[in-house]
Amino acid sequence: MSHDTDKLIRQLSLVAFLMAERRPLTARDVKGSVEGYSEMSDEAFARRFYSDRAELHALGVPLHSQRDEFTGEELYTLRSEQYFLPPLELSDDELAALQTCFYLLEGKFAYAEPLRLALQNLALGRPGFAPAPTRTAVRVEVSDPDYSAEIPGRLGKLEAAISKQRTIRFSYWSIARDDVAERSLNPYALISDNGVWYVVGHDLDRQDERTFRVSRMRSDIRFATRRERDFRIPAGFDVERYRGRPAWQIGEIAGEACIEVGGDTAWWVERVYGRRGHVEDGVFTTPYATLGPLAAWVLRQDGRALPLEPEQLRAEVSRSLDAIQATHEGDPAEPAAEKELDLTDAPAERPASPVAPERFAVLQALLAYLLMRCGDDKQAIIDAEDLVQRFTIPRESLEEHLSLLNLVNFGGGCYAVYAELQGDKVRVDKELFGDTFRSPPRLTPLEARAIRLALEFVGPMIAADAHTPLERVRRKLEETFGEFELAQTPSPSGGNEEEQLIATITDGIRQRRLIELEYQKEGDEAPSARIVEPYELERRLPHWYVHTWDRTSGGERSFRLDRMRSASLTADTFDGRQQFEPRGLRDARPARIWYSPTVARWRVERGDARPLVDGAAVSETAVGSTDWLVGEIFSYRGEAVVLEPGDLRARIAERAGELAGELERPAITT
């Protein structure tokens, strides 16, 4: 057998032995009775037993130890009631909604497999649980702009390094300096922030806590040493500090800015940025680390936000408006030629698997399922394909998995199950201790993390389908996560407003009822009332959108939920429009935009711009709204220029002049 196989048998047998004995046991008891330890020397046993205990703790197995006050020996216990899931009070609607969540994310979610296993455990033995997605699932699309073929494989390696607390090395592209360098990192946590994956940890080269964007890694992720563990995550580490930061708060806080926002904009600023500042009497006060990104945000608001202080912020906004106006007056300069891509320098793509659940967890869940199928009988016959599909086990590996379970013992030759593959069937015989493992085990940290991330991606949809506030579903689930800490996984964000909006919209989609929206789009001074036919929801990270037919304007429109002040069902119903497939931006105009070398790399990274030989970039962009384009160009502070069409260039120049005039009025002293 392989080293990993031997280890799995030892660990599963150790769990079985400790639960069967139900009394404190010494290391000598373990060595003499548990499969895999008895043939070892004392030195090898001490090393392997310590390593196995550490891995079991990392997997969420609540193995306890305490020192005997008389003998001084360490005593080990594992009570079965702490090992298995406690009674879970999820309603059928709530569980079905979680299953919908899996169908929404499958194929686009790196943590799909541990999520599948977690749901398998949560649903084990529940009668009437429907495996099919709910009706809403077919009306929701999820897209992740940062997702690529390499991301799942990298996340899998990073998960392993975080759980084992191993130092890693990798080549990293620093986009600001445009260079690639080898980095060494003690990884503490993974976060998905605004649709982008980051790893947070202690950078050994800079001797500081840093974040690294996973998509900018340019090599395999490698363990730096052969040790079992390289570091410990600091007790005071809090991953929440790194999530949801606006661009102007990345780095050491340098001061506080005050920005005047109109009454009809203040509600949106408070909703979106309330955790990173506050709005009072029409003034948004927010800490900042750097003023450039804050000036970009002010400019994007297209006059709905005016800087008050510090004076440096006003000066940067004024300078940017002058630059924008100057670059959009007259005829544009002809951009350089496009750069020919050198494909020989591109990293070779490797097929990447999604983040895989730990094999130990798969075997735990498989054992519980086999015994559950036996029920009170001594044996059961199960379709092999059912196990292959349910646990995502390759068909050629199924027999090996079953053989491993056959070797798990409780000491003294007592086993839990004997399972044998016979053609396309699996024959299961329940052994003496079979009923001990009949319940589903607690979720591992990875499974718990998968659920938390799923709630982050599509949680409000779950709440809408479950007819239950998301916080209640989340709380019930987290009670099952075990005794380990989830400090390295941020709590799902999102507020009640988002959940209520999605619940209203999904009801409108199901019942074919018109919805009245109060919506403030970019460039508008105040919200407008719309009557719409809702057809489809989309989770395009980091935002939610609803695609509709807008009866107020008489055309197809897509609305971003964070800009909805309210949404309410009307009493009127509508018939679906035949052959109407909402697409968004159907009537958009093309615009050609040039980006300076200062910002070009970021646009090329997004995949919507082509590099030029002088380091600049150019893109063709679909423009559905002139107001949106004005805010978009303004946010680049003079580093982005519309080349064509001419009327849009003229509008941007005109608007920059208008805002420069408004900025000249004296600042209000706060």
Image: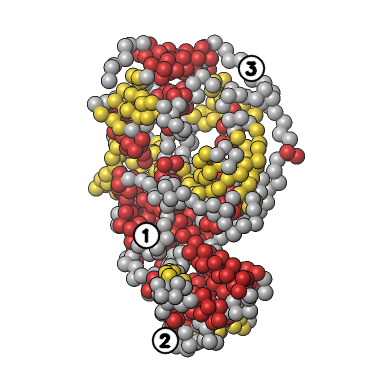
| Number of residues whose C-alpha sits closer than 10 Å to that of mark 1, classed few (under 14), some (14–19) or many (20 or more) | some
Front-most of residues 416 and 498: 416
Residue bearing mark 2: 376
Q: Quadrant of residue 62?
A: bottom left
- The residue shown at (56%, 42%) is 203
Say if 32 sits above or below 220 in the image. Answer: below
Residue bearing mark 1: 478
Q: Where residue 308 sits in the image (x, y, percent)?
A: 34, 19
Front-most of residues 50 and 662: 50
Q: Tag 3: residue type?
A: Glu
Q: Tag 1: residue type?
A: Glu
- The residue shown at (67%, 22%) is 614
Q: Where residue 403 sits in the image (x, y, percent)?
A: 60, 79
Q: Where residue 425 sits in the image (x, y, percent)?
A: 58, 81
Residue farthest to the front, as pictured: 70
| Number of residues whose C-alpha sits closer than 10 Å to that of mark 2, classed few (under 14), some (14–19) or many (20 or more) | few
Q: Nearer the viewer, mark 2 or mark 3?
A: 2
Residue bearing mark 3: 334
Say if 406 sits above or below 144 in the image. Answer: below
Determine whether the residue tagged by mark 1 lies in a helix, strand or loop.
helix
As measured in the structure, the alpha-carbon distance from the residue carrying label 1 to the one carrying label 2 is 30 Å
As measured in the structure, the alpha-carbon distance from the residue carrying label 3 to the one carrying label 1 is 58 Å
Please state if 491 lies on the left or on the right of 156 as rendered: left
Q: Where residue 147 sits in the image (x, y, percent)?
A: 55, 46
